[in-house]
Amino acid sequence: MRASRKPPLTRRQLWFSLSAGGTSFLLISIGVTQFLFIVLGLTGVLALGGALQLGTGNIDKFGGLADMVMTHILISAVVCVGLCLLGIGVSALLLRIGCVDRIVAVTASGIGAAAVVWQNIAWIFVMLWLEALPSAYTFETDPDPHAQAALVMIVIGAILASVVIGALSWWLMAHIFRRSPRAQRG
């Protein structure tokens, strides 16, 4: 007995799965990226500040620095969780409006698939950023406007890549989790 083929996604399902993925993954990636920048940056501040205070004998002031760093990391974590929950909610809403089957499965697996692809692509943008950053902001000379423009283009490229990766991941998951004709009839 031959298995019945699943029908293709309708235009409505296709459009809303692409929209849900692009929008949702952009929100999620912004939340996670800002959290990682804050954690990495403030951990460096904490390490450097602690070393300086230890070297100068002001170690009793280290507690204030540590409290400030932990407060900023906590605020960043709350923003990250908020943006991730907003992204998941937007995905669920758009997929429901688009009549996409298995909303939770599409959203959860879309996030996973997009995250795997994004972690490999993001390193390209990080390396480009680190290459352009020193000449864009120097203390000895005036900043290079071309390097500053390059930084803006790198950020725009990362945002566009995040949207495209999210959109394609959600589309793929909507395609995989669509129901067979027999399941749709009853």
Image (spheres, grey):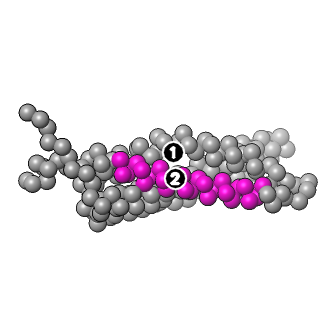
Quadrant in the picture for residue 68: bottom right
Q: Position of residue 87 (x, y in %)?
A: 42, 59
The secondary structure that most of the magenta stretch takes on is helix
* Residue situated in front as seen by the camera: 114 or 75: 114
**Identity of the residue drawn at 82% across and 51% down:** 135
Residue 72 is marked as: none
- In the rendered view, does 71 fall on the left or right side of 109? right
Report the number of discs: 2
**Mark 1 touches mark 2? (CB < 8 Å):** yes
Q: Which residue is mark 1?
A: 118
Q: Secondary structure at mark 1?
A: helix
User: Within 10 Å of the Cα at label 1, are there few (<14), some (14-19), or many (20+) other Cα atoms?
Assistant: some
- Was residue 161 drawn as part of the magenta stretch in this picture? yes
Q: Find disc 2 in the rendering and name its residue.
A: 162
Q: In percent of the image, x 69 and y 46: which residue is there? A: 128
Q: Is 100 in front, or is 29?
A: 100
Residue 87 left/right relative to 66: left
Read off the magenta span.
147-172
Is residue 107 rendered magenta in the image? Answer: no
Q: Position of residue 66 (x, y in %)?
A: 66, 50
* Within-10-Å neighbours for mark 2: few <14, some 14–19, many 20+: many
Location of the N terminus by quadrant is: top left
Q: Is residue 163 above or below residue 47?
A: below
**At 35% from the left edge and 47% from the top edge, which residue is drawn?**
172
Residue 1 shows in this picture: yes
User: Foreground residue, 35 or 151?
Assistant: 151
Tell me how far mark 1 sits from mark 2, CA to CA: 7 Å
